[in-house]
Image (tube, grey):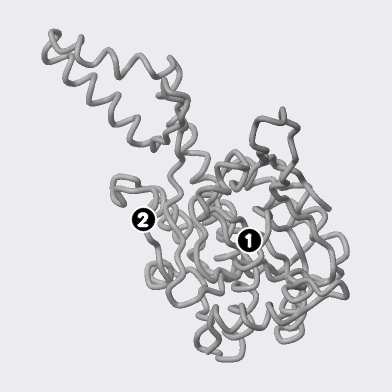
Amino acid sequence: MVSWNDVSNEMSQRRTEQNREDIDGYRREKYSELDQYTERPLIIYATDFLNREKVQACKGEVQIDLNDKDGFNEAIRNIDSNSVDIFLHSPGGLPEATDSLVQIIRSKFKNVRFIIPSVAKSAATMFALSGDRLLMERNAELGPIDPQFSFVKGDGTSIYAPAQAIIDQFEKAQRVIQEDRNKLAAWMPILQQYGPALYQQCQNAIDLSKKYVEDWTKRWMFKKSKKKEELSKALVEYLGDHNAFKSHSARVGVKELRDRKVKVDIINEDEELYDKIMRVYYSISLTFQKTGAFKIFENSRGAALIRQIQQIPIQFPLQMRPQRQAQPQPQQ
């Protein structure tokens, strides 16, 4: 079976006319080979979210947001087909933005299959469940869909808290204070960091995430089942239960999905398909490693929009050591 080192060695031997490593040419060649094997056009949506330094440099733009609409509009523009494969590698992001991406994809394609070679969490899990089928590596994983809220701490850094955990904390504070008013002072520093409408916002966010996935799976994943409403509801209750998972990063694998009747195929069961998909995955990983790219929208028919960190030189007095400042910059 193909390995990361195999692809790295092959890529390093591919050269441009300027004798530079042909990273883009090699990666796009692997897209084309997978396209020809499956006889389905391929769309890439991948972000370098596991690289902490790059996440910091791009100010967290590895997540799904409304800017991604431009990338998907570019990636679908030259595809003339009713079916499509979407290669997905993402930590998730905004559920509302995910809904926008689902509408873009579903307004053009009747049959959508998501390829997940490694990780698609949170809102990326929601996105994947808008497909008709999933194609996953044996050890690939999705995750819970319970929404998270971001809070800025006094030192300027951000922390994330599950919406359900915030609700539980409010309700616990209410019970404790009702039982003993003297404990109000101890709870005040915690409660003061929350806005007056946060409790209801948390409940609304949970309901919205569940509604999206329930609607999408009824319409596509479970559309041929006589029990589609029952299956959709059971799936979102499972994926949306923060108190059962205990962590937003919890693993949801192939078995857990199949137990809930999600249509999942395992790429390892087709050796040639596995080889071609993993070559795509490793070539994307190497692109992230060797370039400033942090988000890739691309297809197997030649369209691409790649967002990357560009190194912009800054002028300093002669006695100071030159520095470089990283800024996110979209590139066509």
Along the viewing direction, whichever of 12 and 118 lies nearer the viewer: 12
Left or right placement of residue 234 versus residue 82 in this view: left
Estimate the x, y position of residue 262 in percent, counting from the top left.
48, 68
Estimate the x, y position of residue 31 in percent, counting from the top left.
73, 76
The three-letter code of the residue at mark 1 reads Phe
Residue drawn 40% across and 68% down?
253
Residue drawn 29% across and 45% down?
243
Residue 289 found in image quarter? bottom right
Residue drawn 86% across and 59% down?
77
Above or below residue 242? Residue 19 is below
The residue lying furthest to the front in this view is 319
Left or right placement of residue 181 versus residue 70 in this view: left
Disc 2, disc 1: CB below 8 Å?
Answer: no
Residue 234 found in image quarter? bottom left
Above or below residue 276? Residue 285 is above
Estimate the x, y position of residue 239 in percent, counting from the top left.
41, 53
Along the viewing direction, whichever of 318 and 299 lies nearer the viewer: 318
Q: Secondary structure at mark 1?
A: helix
Along the viewing direction, whichever of 325 and 153 lies nearer the viewer: 325
Residue drawn 62% across and 59% down?
219
Which label sits on residue 288? 1
* Residue for badge 2: 250
Q: Secondary structure at mark 2?
A: loop
* Total residue callouts: 2
Estimate the x, y position of residue 175 in percent, counting from the top left.
19, 21
